[in-house]
Image (tube, coloured by chain):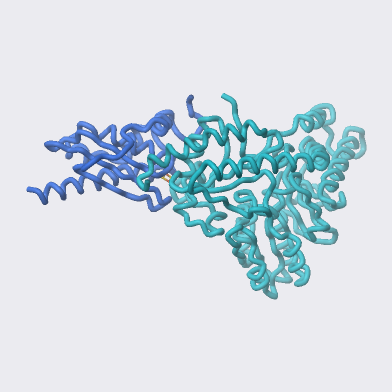
Amino acid sequence: MRKIFFDHISTTPTDPRVVEEMLPYFTSQFGNPSSLFYEHGQQAAKALEEARAKVAGLIGAEAQNIIFTSGATEANNMAIKGIAWANEDKGRHIILSDIEHFSVLFAAQALSRWGFEITRVPVDSYGIIDLGALKASIRADTILISIMHANNEIGTIEPIVEIANIAREKGILFHADAVGTVGIIPVNVGELGVDALTLAGHSFYGPKGIGALYLKQGIRIDPLLQGGFQEAGYRSGTENLPGTVGLGVVAQIAKEEMPSRIEHLLILRDLLWRGLSQRIQDIHFTGHPTQRLPGHVSFWVENAEGESLLLHLAFKGIELASGSACSSNIRGRTEEDLAASQVLTAIGVPSHICTGSLTISLGKDNNREEVEYFLEVFPGIVERLRAMSPWK
Amino acid sequence: MTNKLGPYSDKVMDHFMNPRNMGEMEDPDGLGEVGNPVCGDVMRLYLRIKDGIILDAKFKTFGCGAAIATSSMVTEMLKGKTIEEAKKITNQAVAEALDGLPPVKMHCSVLAEEGLEAAISDYERKKGQIS
Ligand code: FES
């Protein structure tokens, strides 16, 4: 059966051009970048620094301010814990939004054992952070604000520049988790005004297992991993050279192809949006209508449960995501692991209603025919489930 | 199509994709409606009962794959049973008949057991009022 992949916010296929460039670094170019006294090592170090420059080029940074990590989860942990530990003499208060990724939220919560306190700032019904509440939550001992650039579930893009201004005025460091945006839409660390920024390779056609933290010149963090002084001591451990090379290549490709990709995604998104609003009754789109990721459509439908929608769609070969409680943490151990999406709850969707939520995240290789096929089969699935519902 | 790699057994997927006895019933002898506190899902179970034997069962369910499959399975298990036999059907038995459920989904089978209890006590209440 043919598969239609509409879940690019969870991951993307690695671009074959990227894989090709990575391959020699598994075999002939296997050197360790720290072994600088012979050629294998020197070649490896050169490849590492070239990749660093390319990643920096994608986000308007200097190469020396890029720290490679194992992915976004590590970069988020590094930013939150590293900044907190390095600044604990200044204060122990951290501000997040209500819709952060778990790797930000739980990293911050883990700091409570060192006496840190967390304030979570609410978002409006579009998922945009409440800037007034953000200002009001700042305390004399606030050392860090961490807000995501774009939300994965509802696609909303946060006003990062405004947040950065608020943080700068108060002398507070600002980290943005930009996993949803880097490589997808233009991201420039200077224009955004962030002090630290997280990115991940597999969210824009790079390999899994590689990411980076941008850290503005002069900002100190305590490392999570101690060891042999790789990554200027910020992140010890022998570098994932193939992954790093892959991240560099994909950064370069993303920069070149971004404008045409965005155009393509916007056309498909509008087709999807229009088709859904015409064909499905009682559908509610979530997230901001314009301040949103280009390939992202999220919504909930009344009287049809999300996991059931996912199963029926998967049966038709269509793969996407739901924020319903019933489909959450299916690998969990007890029913306590089920919970309605915190993002949907934060934008004010009652939990028994967000059961019907779906997130479609389109990618560069999706096409019009796939969107039309989805629009063709989806109404029948919704009808089938509604016919089963005792409420109608 | 098999779904062995997914969270559910083939049996669950079969009952989910082709639910048995889905629909409503006019003037049921027993009617149970129960909700699931964890995720807000709802099951309605209708029973046709004659001389203490369950002749027919129908359901309507709003919920996940496990909720729909257990609803479907419990209606199959009920048909032809006496009230006393039906009362002994547990959520574990329903889950086992479906070749098991993921741990987070066991509570969905509780919906089926509670729906069954509610429908039978509705029947007994009605019967008590008549005789
Ligand atoms: S009914 Fe919600 S998890 Fe099964």
The correct choice, above or below, for B99 with respect to A307 in the image is above
For image coordinates 67% across by 49% down, the residue present is A73
The total of numbered circles placed on residues is: 0
Give x and y (percent) for residue A241: 80, 37
Tint of chain A: cyan
Q: Is residue A328 visible?
A: yes
Give x and y (percent) for residue A71: 71, 45
Q: Is residue B17 left or right of residue A169?
A: left
Q: Residue furthest bottom?
A: A140
Tint of chain B: blue
Question: Which quadrant, please, contains the N terminus of chain A?
Answer: top right
Q: Quadrant of residue B59?
A: top left
Q: Quadrant of residue A368?
A: top right
Image quarter where ligand 1 lies: top left
Give x and y (percent) for residue A336: 45, 51
Q: Residue furthest left?
A: B131
Q: Is residue A234 visible?
A: no
For image coordinates 60% across by 60% down, the residue present is A98
For image coordinates 82% across by 45% down, the residue present is A55
Q: Nearer the viewer, residue A163 or A35?
A: A163
Q: Quadrant of residue A170?
A: bottom right
Q: Residue furthest front?
A: A278
Give x and y (percent) for residue A360: 60, 42
The correct choice, above or below, for A45 with respect to B9 in the image is below
For image coordinates 77% across by 30% down, the residue present is A19
Q: Is residue A184 left or right of residue A329?
A: right
